[in-house]
């Protein structure tokens, strides 16, 4: 990520940090976090784990409960400070230039971050570099083959704070067909895990009679043949 775009992203997430956790402990956002954790836990238990773009540490704190070591990195000081307040080991830095040694982690994972990194090639190379041979990477992409994509296009950029909207940060969309061409040569694509396959728009999870059943259906769909249509598509990779 170039200096100008990186500075812009840092300001965006610093501004976002004050309101980021508002409403995240229940409903739609809790469901998304739970599905991402479900995908992560089999690889995180007993592992040295690194989260790229850990934000306020909502996912990292849960990984830390089962991992041998859990480390995070984030571009935003505002986000990182909230994660540190949770007692987490969080560094400030770019996912395109990680301050870690080669082959340091058993698991490197990232959610809702890579879609906002213009230099995706650099980010993927760095994520691979710090992962040990035989280790795994769980990297989440925004999928244009999804109901989420259609909903985003229909609704337009949404506010994320008093003075910011989603249009203030760049966003890329990569389909299951596109992702393999982005990967470094020394990683193998093992599988995909789909998050938010069936939810047409987030607000549907506010409807009491629908939310619980839809959450159960999303859990089943995440590993079904429908997973390729997840709005958030987690690529499960193994480093050779």
Image (cartoon, rainbow, N blue to C red):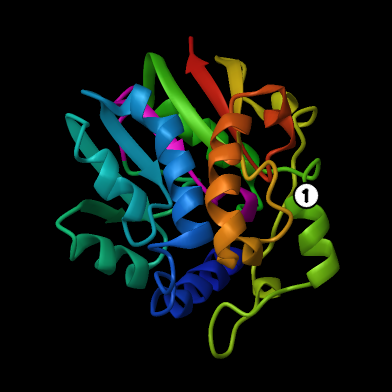
Q: Measuring 35% from the left and 48% from the top, which residue is drawn there?
A: 59
Query: What residue span does the magenta drawing correspond to?
Result: 100-116
Location of residue 80 in the rendering, given as x and y in whole percent from the top left corner: 31, 63
Q: Measuring 59% from the left and 25% from the top, which residue is drawn there?
A: 223
Characterize the local packing of mark 1: few (<14), some (14-19) or many (20 or more) Cα atoms within 10 angstroms.
some
Whether 143 is drawn above or below 56: the answer is: above
Q: In which quarter of the image is the N terminus?
A: bottom right
Helix, strand or loop at disc 1? helix
What residue is shown with label 1?
147
Location of residue 240 in the rendering, given as x and y in whole percent from the top left corner: 48, 9
Q: Can residue 144 be seen in this view?
A: yes
Location of residue 171 in the rendering, given as x and y in whole percent from the top left corner: 70, 58
Looking at the picture, tell me which residue is in the foreground, 162 or 80.
162
Q: Can residue 1 be seen in this view?
A: no
Looking at the picture, tell me which residue is in the foreground, 143 or 202.
202
Location of residue 64 in the rendering, given as x and y in whole percent from the top left corner: 22, 41
């Amino acid at each position: 990520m170039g200096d100008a775009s990186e500075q812009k992203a840092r300001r965006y997430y610093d501004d976002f940090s004050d309101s980021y956790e508002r409403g995240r402990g229940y409903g739609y956002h809790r469901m998304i976090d739970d599905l991402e954790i479900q995908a992560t836990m089999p690889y995180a238990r007993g592992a040295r784990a690194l989260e790229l773009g850990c934000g306020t540490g909502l996912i990292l704190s849960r990984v830390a409960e089962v991992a041998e070591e859990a480390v995070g990195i984030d571009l935003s000081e505002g986000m990182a400070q909230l994660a540190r307040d949770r007692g987490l080991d969080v560094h400030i830095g770019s996912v395109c230039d990680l301050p870690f040694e080669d082959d340091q982690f058993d698991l490197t994972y990232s959610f809702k971050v890579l879609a906002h990194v213009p230099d995706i090639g650099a980010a993927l190379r760095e994520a691979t570099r710090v992962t040990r041979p035989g280790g795994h990477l769980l990297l989440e992409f925004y999928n244009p083959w999804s109901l989420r994509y259609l909903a985003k296009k229909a609704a337009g950029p949404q506010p994320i704070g008093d003075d910011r909207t989603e249009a203030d940060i760049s966003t890329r969309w990569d389909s299951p067909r596109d992702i393999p061409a982005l990967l470094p040569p020394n990683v193998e694509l093992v599988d995909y895990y789909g998050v938010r396959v069936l939810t047409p728009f987030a607000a549907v999870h506010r409807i009491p009679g629908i939310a619980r059943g839809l959450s159960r259906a999303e859990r089943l769909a995440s590993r079904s043949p429908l997973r390729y249509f997840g709005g958030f598509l987690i690529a499960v990779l193994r480093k050779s």
